[in-house]
Amino acid sequence: MTYHPKSEFLRIMIERGYLADCTDYQGLDDALMAGTVPAYIGYDATAASLHVGHLLNIMMLRWLQKTGHKPITLMGGGTTKVGDPSFRSDERPLLGPDQIQANIDGMNKVFARYLDYSDAPNGAIMLNNAEWLDGLNYLEFLRDIGRHFSVNRMLSFESVKSRLDREQSLSFLEFNYMILQAYDFLELNRRYGCLLQMGGSDQWGNIVNGIDLTRRVLDHEIYGLTSPLLTTSDGKKMGKSQGGAMWLNAEMLSPYDFWQFWRNTTDADTGKFLKLYTELPVEECERLGALQGSEINEAKIILANEVTALLHGEEAAKAAEATAKEVFEKGIAGGDLPRLTLSAEELGDGISVVQIFVRSGLAATGKEAKRLIADNGAKIDDESVTDAGKLITAADLASPLKLSAGKKRHAIVELG
């Protein structure tokens, strides 16, 4: 990166590793220096919670606000009805309006932890693109907006090209998505003076479309900024684990499991993640990330505490760390571990150990649980499980059992 920004926001984006590309560094920098810049990121309501993969861009909005600018969280109540085809091999399942609204309600809980939605000059605003998309007149939209789009150019975008190159179907419905997203940027600029769209680098084509459309229709200069698509040092997509997506809503993933996810960061990723996901000074992040041997574990605990405190609060972070110490150092079952409570009816004459591991969330399928047992990775009260056919009975559950999958994932099973 050769550009040296004057604005605090761009400097932080570059220093901490948030920035992949920008449509006009100088123009955006000047706008940031001239006054409060409203900027948005769009989120389609495809699930009831955001997940760790969204966290990098949420932190970008947080830094935007901390440096005096105005974040806009745009919920895709309209675009979710179409589905973003970007880098997907198949069409997204279409959701009904009630499910979309329920998902938006679940996602809003997370944003409130990171952003201030007050009436301050740089107070964040939550918008829904259904506000302008639901009432569109199709013929007018084609005439006024559609004429600005070249199909040849749209076919050249990587998100579309990769699908067509694999000879996988791309529906006309999905093909419209990039036009609707470009129209979002136009409307946000017209209605709210929004000057900047941010997103992952897979959104570059969609962002550029919005900038071109706004320039053609309103003759306004606006900007785009993308973040790198993050993978862990072992090449996995950020936010994915063996147990599935790492959700940000506490009812979908316990604060303890969230804390553990960060505690289990690989040595090579620790410094990078401290810069991206915490607000510790860059120098401190680099110092902690450079620690070697057992000392790097202290850096991972700091990472887990800082990230968990931002999302779930300091008390939850402290409780998770205390539970982890109890589990790992003293070998006892901590109170904040995920719990599976079985009724006497469910238990009956006994329930298989394979089913227990699946029901507790430590294995996604029976096949995975059997493989865990075969690999000596399954333990009950720190004793290895060797028989996949073993039954857990009421006598076994006279007191709660601690299940372990490997060294780092645990759960409690009890009789309710």
Image (cartoon, grey):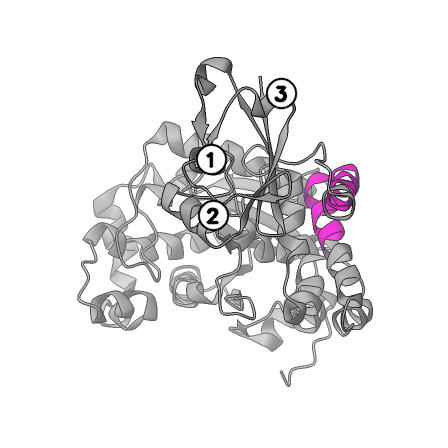
For the residues labelled 2 and 1, the Cα–Cα distance comes to 9 Å
For the residues labelled 3 and 1, the Cα–Cα distance comes to 16 Å
107 relative position to 216: left or right: right
Q: Position of residue 364 (x, y in %)?
A: 43, 43
Q: Position of residue 229 (x, y in %)?
A: 50, 66
Asked whether disc 2 touches disc 1, contact meaning CB atoms under 8 Å apart, the reply is yes
Residue numbers of the magenta segment: 304-325
Type of amino acid under label 3: Ala
Identify the mark at residue 27; answer none if there is no mark: none
Look at mark 2 in the image and give the residue it sits on. Answer: 373
Q: Quadrant of the N terminus?
A: bottom right
Look at mark 1 in the image and give the residue it sits on. Answer: 353
Callout 3: SS: helix
Give the residue drawn at x 77%, y 41%.
326
How many residues crowd mark 2 within 10 Å: few (<14), some (14–19), many (20+)? Answer: many
Type of amino acid under label 1: Val
Residue 176 sits in which quadrant? Answer: bottom left
Residue 324: in magenta span = yes
How many residues crowd mark 1 within 10 Å: few (<14), some (14–19), many (20+)? Answer: many
Look at mark 3 in the image and give the residue it sits on. Answer: 398
Callout 1: SS: helix
- Residue 372 is at least partly visible in this image: yes
Quick check: 264 above or below 402? below
Give the residue drawn at x 76%, y 55%.
301
Give the residue drawn at x 21%, y 58%.
170
Q: Compare residues 181 and 285 and report the one nearer the observer.
A: 285
Asked whether disc 2 touches disc 3, contact meaning CB atoms under 8 Å apart, the reply is no
